[in-house]
Image: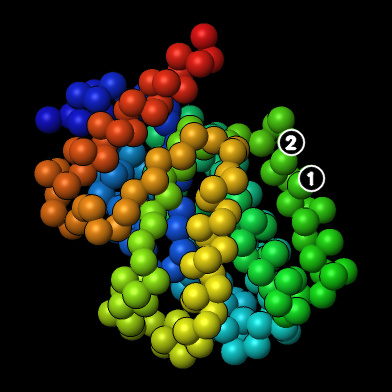
Amino acid sequence: MNLRKKYNIPSNSVITIAGTVGVGKSTLTNALADALQFRTSFEKVDTNPYLDKFYHDFSRWSFHLQVYFLAERFKEQKKIFEYGGGFIQDRSIYEDTGIFARMHYEKGTMSETDYETYTSLFDAMVMTPYFPHPDLLIYLEGSLDDILARIDKRGRTMEKETPVEYWQEMHGRYEKWIDSFSSCPVLRLNINDYDATEGTSAIEPILEKVAVILEQKNLAKR
């Protein structure tokens, strides 16, 4: 069964998955892409030259990391729309400035000069009429305890060695950020309400919600 056609989801749709570390963005990205026969776009973690250094010294590497992410996500967003859409994207470009860069600036691990340089770059690249925003952002949310358990289960050394206070801070900032996000429509999903590894039975209810939001968006354009 072609679920994209069943739920009348346009073949050129671009859907972005957002949420803090450990909520299952990659798993849901794969599951939705399989169901809709879309391509995937994943965050480049293993090839990131700054990530390990960053986790060991936030102050030294926060600016470098954020500029790297900005450049990579911008290139990826451009590629997605040059393909003509039909993508599920793991993590959004908006989280970098709305959460990570701001957090490091406010916590003192990014200088004011670096933060102003970064936000100027972001605004020039993303906050323009020419930047192609996704059709929908799916925000994955859950309790801090549930997210910490998933981080521990995943077993990445650099994440497990990061102080719990960092994840607590990030969790709170994500909740505040999504409440004011307005660059595209948002679907909020609690990670305890579905299991993306269970296949079609778990994904179809999500696709129903996606279809309703995309239809409302298309009607608003007319």
Q: Position of residue 37 (x, y in %)?
A: 27, 37
Task: Tell me the SS state at disc 2.
Answer: loop
Q: Position of residue 4 (x, y in %)?
A: 26, 29
> Is residue 154 in view?
no
Amino acid type of disc 2? Thr
Q: Are marks 2 and 1 in contact (CB under 8 Å)?
A: yes
> Is residue 163 in view?
yes
Position of 180 with respect to 147 (left or right) is right
Q: Residue at x 46, y 53 (%)?
A: 18
Q: Position of residue 76 (x, y in %)?
A: 55, 49
Q: Residue at x 82, y 53 (%)?
A: 120
Image-quadrant location for residue 125: top right
Q: Position of residue 140 (x, y in %)?
A: 38, 54
Q: Residue at x 67, y 57 (%)?
A: 97
Amino acid type of disc 1? Ala
The extreme top residue here reads 222
Position of 66 with respect to 13 (left or right) is right
The extreme right residue here reads 113
Task: Tell me the SS state at disc 1.
Answer: helix
Q: Residue 50 or 175: which is nearer the viewer? A: 175
Q: Which residue is mark 1?
A: 124
Image-quadrant location for residue 25: bottom left
Position of 155 with respect to 85 (left or right) is left
How many dots with numbers? 2
Q: Residue 71 or 207: which is nearer the viewer? A: 207
- Image quarter of the N terminus: top left
Mark 2 vs mark 1, CA separation in Å: 7 Å
Q: Which residue is mark 2?
A: 128
Q: Residue at x 51, y 16 (%)?
A: 220
- Pointer 1 local density, CA inside 10 Å: few below 14, some 14–19, many at least 20: few
Circle on res. 220: none
- Pointer 2 local density, CA inside 10 Å: few below 14, some 14–19, many at least 20: few
